[in-house]
Amino acid sequence: MQKRYLGQHEVGAIGLGAMSLGGMYGPTDEAESFATLDAAREAGISHIDIANIYGMGRSEAVVGAWLKARRIAPGQGVVLATKAAIIPGPPRQINNEAAYLRAELEASLKRLGRDHIELFYLHRREAERPVEEVAGSMQRLVEEGKIGGYGLSEVSPATLRRAHAVHPVMAVQNEYSLWTRLPELGLISACAELGVSFVAFSPLGRGIFGDQPLARPMDPFRSQNPRFSAVNLPENLAAVARFRAFALARGYSCPALALAWILHQAPHLLPIPGTRAALHLRSWGKAEQIRLGAADLAEIAQILPAGFAAGARYAASQRTGVESYC
């Protein structure tokens, strides 16, 4: 697989978002999760992204068990990232206190079977707490050898700059895809300027860019999301159907082309699509081999212009801690 940099780590250009391994988008089991992780490694994926709340620790435990079963030690080709700060509700709360982040990190390391992790994200920013204080907390974890570097998720360019001035930020993780383009308004360019990797989560639009059109009803998360409502979903499916036809006419799967589009936007972008099935992973695993010319990109822009998606990307209950900046 083509390589890119996540901080100082050379990783596959495409990573794996492991939220689905915790059952967030439907039931799964350890055998299926292990098969998915094995397929990811075979495809050249070396960057695995998790969080403490994915399945309330289940995703981390599954990845930790897989690492142990496959005898993959730290530094043997798998770069891990996890996150903390969200306290699930209702109502959802955000805690950036140093003691809380440290305790959650220790619990994550125990589930992963590690005493160190390459990247530790602030999953959401607590608006009332100065981000400089949080950056200082992360710096101490780096100095103690608990983490290789820290990241921020769903933040504004201004927050990135303030944190980076205290201690360099390794990566920013925000939603970015053909139907979520907000990071183009300053965040992607700020990351490039500061030498910060940009990790694109939900690069397949939470399944909208899958091989098959989505149908309702769905899991609890998407069933509350405005873009998947009974009113908005048909409009979004119709738009993506045109893109899917464009991809198939050129011999690509819809998810592979959606990932290739992201990779063509800038060299510091690393998409992390998620799946709980090895079969789905194989449908997009070679996306980095797709080469898109100016004419291809122009046609995609006509089919799916920026802002085409009907509905907000989060419901009010899902927006806690997400920074707006435009």
Image (tube, rainbow, N blue to C red):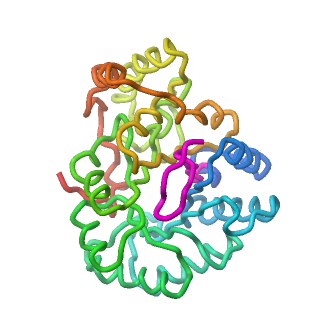
**165 sits to left or right of 73:** left
Q: Is residue 5 magenta?
A: yes
Name of the residue lying farthest toward the top:
249
Q: Is residue 211 above or below residue 140?
A: above
Query: Residue at left 65%, top 34%?
Result: 282
User: Residue 150, percent across and down?
Assistant: 44, 71
| Viewer-closest of 73 and 10 | 10
Name of the residue lying farthest toward the left:
326
Query: Residue at left 39%, top 36%?
Result: 264
| Viewer-closest of 77 and 207 | 77
Query: Residue at left 26%, top 60%?
Result: 156
Q: Quadrant of the N terminus?
A: top right
Q: Based on the displayed image, in which of its 4 quarters is residue 145 positioned?
A: bottom right
Q: How many marks?
A: 0
**188 sits to left or right of 124:** left
User: Residue 271, percent across and down?
Assistant: 47, 46
Q: Based on the displayed image, in which of its 4 quarters is residue 95 positioned?
A: bottom left
User: Residue 115, percent across and down?
Assistant: 65, 79
Query: Residue at left 31%, top 83%?
Result: 133
Q: Is residue 326 magenta?
A: no
**253 sits to left or right of 151:** right
Numbered range of the magenta stretch: 1-20
User: Residue 63, percent across and down?
Assistant: 69, 60
| Viewer-closest of 311 and 164 | 164
Q: Is residue 197 above or below residue 44?
A: below
| Viewer-closest of 171 and 59 | 171
